[in-house]
Image (tube, rainbow, N blue to C red):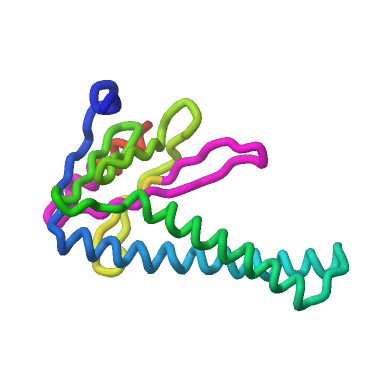
Amino acid sequence: METLTKNPVLAHWYYSVEEWEAFTRTEKKIRGEEVLLEAFLITVLGTLLLHFTRGASWVVALAICMVISTIYAMIRYTMRLNTIRWRNPSLPEVIITSSAVIINGNKLDYHSETRWLRRADLAEKEGRNLLAITYEWQTRKGVTFDEIRIPIPKGRLKEGMEIQQRLNQV
């Protein structure tokens, strides 16, 4: 827990089981749709590339791309949901510091030497308030963005707004 000694804790939230399960259902739906869209695009673009650049038949190109996109989708979906996984013996919890979020023991850095915080936004999606922290990092192919979505517990919207303001001041 070195993060907690170096950075001040902005929030330490516990959730009811019902609240967390409702959040995970929503996230599974949203992230599943995102991954399916990515897999569809991989299939279409890959099929076109294989057919026109390598001269593969449409059926062979489509089959190859479907296998690749299915494997990609399964891995991507599993990795994206791994961050919100909850182990039953303890209550679901989120700790927010000025540089990381710890969700049920899984640490996600959003502001470090290699990652840069871009913004924090509050939004209402499917009847619940979410804090979305957007960050970027440099890869060989350029800048890549990602987002951490955190549910705001019932009765803590004001605290969520304060965290949003503090993160956007950085």
**Depicted 57 relative to depicted 15: above or below:** below
Res. 135 image quadrant = top left
Q: Residue furthest top?
A: 6
Work out whether residue 121 can be spotted: no
Q: Which residues are magenta?
A: 134-162
User: How many labels, in total?
Assistant: 0
Residue 51 lies left or right of residue 141; in this view the side is right
Whether the magenta-drawn stretch holds residue 158 is answered as yes
Closer to the camera in the image, 168 or 141? 141
Q: Quadrant of the C terminus?
A: top left
Closer to the camera in the image, 76 or 7? 76
Q: Position of residue 82 (x, y in %)?
A: 37, 51
Which residue is found at the position 53% from the left and 37% from the top?
137
Residue 73 lies left or right of residue 66; in this view the side is left
Which residue is found at the position 34% from the left and 35% from the top?
100
Residue 50 lies left or right of residue 9; in this view the side is right
Which residue is found at the position 66% from the left and 37% from the top?
140
Q: Quadrant of the N terminus?
A: top left
Closer to the camera in the image, 170 or 57? 57
Work out whether residue 28 can be spotted: yes
Q: Position of residue 109 (x, y in %)?
A: 39, 36
Q: Position of residue 110 (x, y in %)?
A: 40, 37
